[in-house]
Image (cartoon, rainbow, N blue to C red):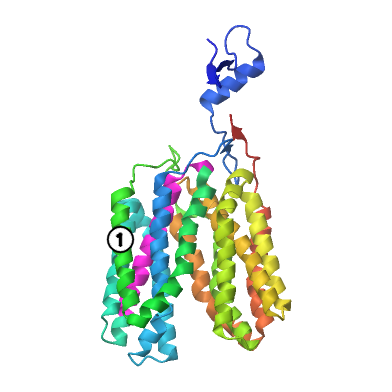
Amino acid sequence: MPVRARRRGRVVPGPKTGRGARPRDVVRAREAQHHPVTAAGPGSVPPVAAAQPSLPREVYVLSVVGGCVMLGLGLVLPVLPVYAATFGAGPTQIGVLVALFALMRLATSPFCGRLAVRFGERRVLVAGLLLCAVSSALTAFAGSYGQLLVFRSLGGVGSVLFSVSALAALLAIAPADQRGRASAVFDAGFLLGGVCGPALGGLLALISLSAPFVVYAVLLLAAAALTLAVLRTGRTAGAEPGRDVAGLPVLLRDRRYLVACLAALAQGWVLFGLRSALVPMVVVAWRHDMTWVGWAFTISAVVQSLLIMPAGRVVDRSGRRPAMIAGTGVAAAAITALVFVDGYAWLVVLLSVYAAASALLAAAPAALLGDVVAGRAGSGVAVFSMCTDVGAVVGPVVVGLIAERVGVPAAFGSGAALLVIAFVASWTLTTVRPTRRS
């Protein structure tokens, strides 16, 4: 019997499947019944619906939780060096304190994937939030520099437990054809928290240097409560049935996984090594104060915030490969052009161009990762997160050495070179043109 649908008060016949049906109609009807989403090939993006369905509620919950975490980090990071100085810490000791957080993240990352598989992403995520909350509360009442080191170490462990399990949960919850949008929503929470945090932290520091740490602990407790109340582990639309958790040796033979990890390494290197370490030096050398640095970073953050949602839609509609090529290519061009910049206005323009590329690179590698691991947790998600941390830890040191011994242009060139390698690797991906559901 023909399938019929009502539209604006009249009956519209569907494709014929019985006697007298045309062969093309039969094929379409069978595809609609058995293949609502056509299979994607290696390195491809899953097909996309003609009308974009809404994302699962849990994606927005993870975005809010991530925003709380980044808001809290933004509260404490500007205050931490001043707070450590009250315990007699010098520049070197302050540097160790700041670097220790990232080092603990890096050291703990290899174990996070196994913990998520054994205990579930939700439990590990909440444990990470609670550990960070305890760390921040203890830091507020620390009595010595040694205690600060211990408490910040705990914070680094909690941070990586949260970030790895949150990404694994996101990839499990988001359907395959919505991973780009889901990754964009997730990163949007981090961006907004990171933009608002430093300004609020400065205001809280006027009350007391320990106040930002107390507020951060409260934010983390609220985020943990929200996770327990709303996030459910039963929603696993992104986890493909029949697919077990892939081991790391298998993932390392998958080109898509290597390209995603390479992009994450390049982003960590550029964001934390070049942008955070070199750009302030360049601006100060032009005889501008740190306020000008803040404005440059704020403008680029606003650009990325405005473009990150459209970027997520591009990743799902056009495919992972085009998004990776565009993101790494534009980012490499922007960082390369910084070598030849000699004025503040052009610096801001190029940082904004890089921010636009970063919007794509916030969504595409994570979506590509989700395609590879089939939405399941494991060591693959942890290693992907480690690549960003390696760039964040090693990048500032290496970039600083290159700037001192060779020159600032060469230091910018190190980041551009990594992005060019990621750009070339992205070209090697294969893709299948996305088709829309009927």
Task: Specify whether 398 is left or right of 416.
Answer: left
Q: Residue at x 40, y 45 (%)?
A: 57
Q: How many marks?
A: 1
Q: Residue at x 40, y 80 (%)?
A: 79
Percent position (x, y) of residue 312? 56, 51
In the rendered image, which residue does mark 1 sit on?
222
Q: Quadrant of residue 147?
A: bottom left
Q: Quadrant of residue 143?
A: bottom left
362 up-or-down from 400: above or below = above
Percent position (x, y) of residue 167? 43, 55
Label 1 amino acid? Ala
Q: Is residue 156 magenta?
A: yes
Q: Residue furthest right?
A: 340
Q: Residue furthest front?
A: 9
Looking at the image, which is closer to me, 117 or 128?
128
**SS class, disc 1:** helix
Q: Residue at x 70, y 80 (%)?
A: 343
Q: Is residue 12 magenta?
A: no
Q: Quadrant of residue 127?
A: bottom left
Read off the magenta span: 149-177
Percent position (x, y) of residue 397? 53, 80
72 up-or-down from 150: above or below = above
Percent position (x, y) of residue 258? 56, 57
- Magenta residues, dominant SS class: helix
Task: Specify whether 98 is left or right of 416.
Answer: left
Q: Is residue 113 visible?
A: yes
Q: Is residue 377 visible?
A: no
Q: What quarter of the picture does the C terminus occupy?
A: top right
Q: Residue furthest top?
A: 19
Task: Specify whether 223 is left or right of 282.
Answer: left
298 up-or-down from 222: above or below = below
203 up-or-down from 40: above or below = below
